[in-house]
Amino acid sequence: MSEQRRYEPQEIEPRWQALWAAERTWEVANDADAPGVAGAALARSASGSAGGASGAVSTGPQATKSYVLEMLPYPSGEPHIGHLKVYSVGDAIAHFHRRLGRRVLHPMGYDAFGLPAENHAIKTGVHPRDSTAASIASFRRQFHEWGISIDWSRELGTHEPRYYRWTQWIFLELLRAGLAYRKEAAVKWCPHDQTVLANEQVLDGHCERCGAEVEIRQLEQWFLRITDYAERLLGDLDGIDWPEHVKTMQRNWIGRSEGAEVTFRCEALGVDYPVFTTRPDTLFGATFFVMAPEHPDVPRLAARTEHEQVVHDYVNHALTESGEERSAADRPKTGVALGRTVTNPVNGEQIPMYVADYVLMEYGTGAIMAVPGHDERDHAFATAFGLPIRRVIEEPAGATGGGQAVEGQAGEQKAGDGKAGTGDTRELPYTGDGPLVNSDPRFDGKGNREALPEIVSWLDHEGKGHASVNYRLRDWLVSRQRYWGCPIPVVYCERCGMVPVPEQDLPVELPDVEDYAPQGRSPLAAAEDWVATSCPACEGPARRETDTMDTFVDSSWYFLRYCDANNDSAAWDPAALRQWMPVDQYIGGVEHAILHLMYARFFCKALADLGHLDFQEPFRALFTQGMVTKDGAKMSKSRGNVVSPASIVERYGADTARCYILFIAPPDQDADWSDDGVEGIHRFLGRLWRLAAETAERGAAIEGVVDGQVEPAQAATGGEGADLELLRKAHWAIDKVSTDLRRFAFNTAIAAVMELLNDSSRLREQVTVESQRFALSTAASLLFPFAPHVCAEIYALLNGGARAWEQPWPQADPALLERDTYELVCQVNGKLRDRVPAPADATPEQLKELCRAAPNVQAHLDGKEIVKEIVVPGKLVNVVVR
RNA sequence: GCGGCGGUGGCGGAACGGUAGACGCGGGGCCCUCAAAAGGCCCUGUCCGCAAGGGCGUGUGGGUUCGAUUCCCACCCGCCGCACCA
């Protein structure tokens, strides 16, 4: 190099950021014809070709839209390295789509309500409104400093009244449709702190803060009826382009099971108890009946019996245990008898009722029929309590099922039930398939799978049961007794009951309260003059709902609001949604695989049913990025291994930070941060910049080129020797980067540009300035989505001030991707023995000749018989010898 | 237990069934320099060999194939979900 030049991102980056901000480069209007949008700018300049592009992309009203969206950040403190990663990925995609000629919507907002901000406020004494504002300012500033191409005209915060006004509107729509409702639910209550506790805040049945024994209280809570959508949430997963593991998690979460609901009658009380079972084929093996401790009928069943006190104690103990304790997998089965019986509808047997904590109130009906012969849990319980165990399915000879085959007598079967002894002496429980026995003459001998539907239709006919589908999914509890959230827009009137706040009175603004610490009821309840209001229906005295909404409600529709973010007369104009939705590429952490992504899908389906949307799925494609670790561990303050994006950006510049985080690993994988690795990327960008600066200088010296006087680099199509080699490499890189961007392989895309730079550098003494300029221009063009500032700089430097982001994405010339000679791989018995140059158009016969003639192939053929020759044109010849 | 993902040099990672280890980091040598920083050039899976070359190598064991990191079967290990779900 002629003289020492330094790559100075601190000088380069703010300059381009200022330009993009001043020109509002990344804003895109809803009206496709509107001037000043990025797409239109591209259209204007698309006549010049650059970076080897042929066939400029046209944009305009007809241009394809692309909605590229990263999950909005929760503004707490400063952005961390995970934010840098997700927005680097999203920005690369947004830039790529723009330069493919699409109109790209790439907005930003903040998920600003929520517990962490509130807890932080309680701890520091800074009002959540203020700490959130400070955090948002920090995020906004850093997004600018990272050079993320955001349409800032659509910025929003979910805590702003102009946003949550519409969150409340959606809530009212759901309420109107019966999809939001109030219901009593069992919640944990600390009698000392006078507060509801989350399950996580209960340790060993005691309050984690004061140690008081926790009680269970039935409290009214707000729910959203997501279970109505279980089937559609499951079925529609098939039509969206999401990672398989995310779909699997959602399927598991929904937990669909097919079976039957069967009614067991308690004659003493005259009450029918339905149970859900996936195994109606084993009904004849039901020898007892179990209810969950939370089952509302349990006290009633035990009342005035000798079991009353024991049952009461057991239930109380079970209720105060933490979910974690109760679900500990192989804990011994516990329970107590209720002293009552129910009738097994298939055979009229009276079977005893128990209450046991292995039965969950949340699943099915909160009561089960127990079939100890064919269910492991029921078997464990029966064994512990000396209950009869009956085999109703034979184990086919040689089959392996749940039970292990044992020699001799099945000693485990201490059942006092005469029917237990059949010819099958293998151990129970048996959970596999086989012919029914000990059931009913109509079914005995039939395969259980075959008999199952027959039994169900028989039950149906008798009015004792019916086919049924059950889901694990529960309705979504959305009310929170917390301050920093969206107020639920209803009031309670003594005369009219619960009354929705009329739409024109929205938003119900969150009042400023001084004491927002949780205290058993919502902190909002303390804001007396806010709570006291008048009934919208009768104008009589009424009180406002003081619970707020779960933060996940806020983030279940924000992607819709971006489409029409500044609309003050509606949540959105349907035309705006038609223009942008669904999101074409959604990007975020896999930690939201279930909750956020399920809720957002639910909202879309519900809003579509209400006529507000004309699509069912919000996110057509999803990409989940992996975590960034340091020294193999999750970054955390307590470990002291936090790498702050701000410090990296300050030291190396945003381009280096962004490129590095995309280079270390495929973005969907976890990646370990290495300080040395960052240096490597910084060297690479520095080398690219220096070589480009040198090339521009050389060009100026030879051609008298000065800024603004040359067209963007023309696609060179000729040349020979080193020039041709470099030209080919550039086209190879175009092809490689284009392919890799489509499959999110940013690491290999950046590697390809590195190769192009390495060749440019190696050949720089042997090629013309024009070749060099084309190669480096192409490198900058291809790298722009990852390192926009330095690439804009280089592109302008080499192309008379032309703007990289306005250039169509380069296209590889197929003719230059092919070679007239290549290195033929010569194998003997599949082992590489030699490589020889071969003409691209050689026939298979000629290739065989070439291979056999290769010196080292000769050596391995010596004295052997050629059995076969495999020819893969363009690649290799494999000679098989004996 | 069920489901998903993964296991390749000293490290991060490449590789349409066809040259294993691209690219980068780290390491070694050299150039530039009074010296250093910065930068540049070369080498770098492993073993044998002066070299040419050869042996061995993608968690383990089988299989399919002319050829397997890639496809199939069984297993081991790690990570992530879910988990007494009837």
Image (cartoon, coloured by chain):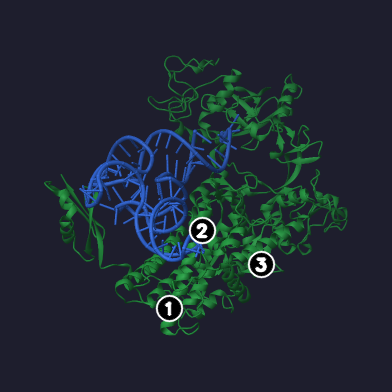
The structure residue drawn at horizontal position 71% and vertical position 50%, both measured from the top left corner, is A116
Q: Is residue B69 above or below residue A369?
A: below
- Marks 2 and 1 sit apart, C-alpha to C-alpha, by 28 Å
Whichever of labels 2 and 3 marks the residue nearer the N terminus, that label is: 3
Which residue is under mark 1? A698
* Colour chain B appears in: blue
Horizontal and vertical percent for residue A709? Answer: 48, 85
* Colour chain A appears in: green
Which residue is under mark 3? A565
Q: Is residue A283 above or below residue A544?
A: above
Quarter the C terminus of chain A occupies: top left
- Marks 2 and 3 sit apart, C-alpha to C-alpha, by 40 Å
Quarter the N terminus of chain A occupies: bottom left
The structure residue drawn at horizontal position 73% and vertical position 64%, both measured from the top left corner, is A162
- Marks 1 and 3 sit apart, C-alpha to C-alpha, by 49 Å
Looking at the picture, do discs 2 and 3 lie on one chain? Answer: yes
Whichever of labels 1 and 3 marks the residue nearer the N terminus, that label is: 3
Q: Is residue A85 above or below residue B1?
A: below
Q: Are marks 2 and 1 in contact (CB under 8 Å)?
A: no
Q: Which mark is residue A136?
A: none
Q: Which mark is residue A679?
A: 2
Select label 1 or label 3 by which is in front: 1
